[in-house]
Image (cartoon, grey):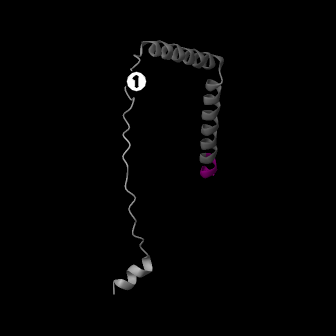
Amino acid sequence: MYKEIKYLVFLLIIFLFLFFVSKYYFSDKNIKKSYRQLNNIDSRNSIYAEKLPILDDDTQNIIEYVDQSKKKKKKFNFWNLLEKDE
């Protein structure tokens, strides 16, 4: 009997928690508050973007190309290496 009552209380607490959280989350007050906060973030970002300094591009002609000699690469065969290792 106590076990069933305990489970009923747990379920009741979970459902009440979900109900109150969803009620607050979908309330008009919270929706208006979140939209205002998003607008504030956008306006702050635009203000900070205007204050950012623009750096000069100093990356012209920094790549130096080096001629590499074409050496023959030694091909290794795994089985041949095992045979020589006897």
Q: Is residue 60 left or right of 18 when viewed as pictured?
A: left
Q: Amino acid at mark 1?
A: Asp
Q: Position of residue 63 (x, y in %)?
A: 38, 37
Q: Is residue 11 left or right of residue 69?
A: right
Q: Nearer the viewer, residue 44 or 32?
A: 44
Query: Which residues fall within the magenta stretch?
Result: 1-5
Which residue is at 39% across, 82% downward? 82
Q: Main secondary structure of the magenta part?
A: helix
- Residue in the image at 40% along x and 66% along y: 73
* Element type where label 1 sits in the image: loop
Judging by the rendered image, the residue that carries numbered circle 1 is 57
Q: How many numbered marks have been drawn onto this rendered protein structure?
A: 1
Q: Position of residue 7 (x, y in %)?
A: 62, 47
Does the magenta segment cover residue 4? Answer: yes
What residue lies at 59% left-to-right and 46% top-to-bottom?
Answer: 6
Q: Residue at the bottom extreme?
A: 86
Q: Position of residue 19 (x, y in %)?
A: 65, 31
Return the residue nearer the eye: 12 or 39. Answer: 39
Q: Nearer the viewer, residue 10 or 65?
A: 65
Quarter of the view holding residue 52? top left
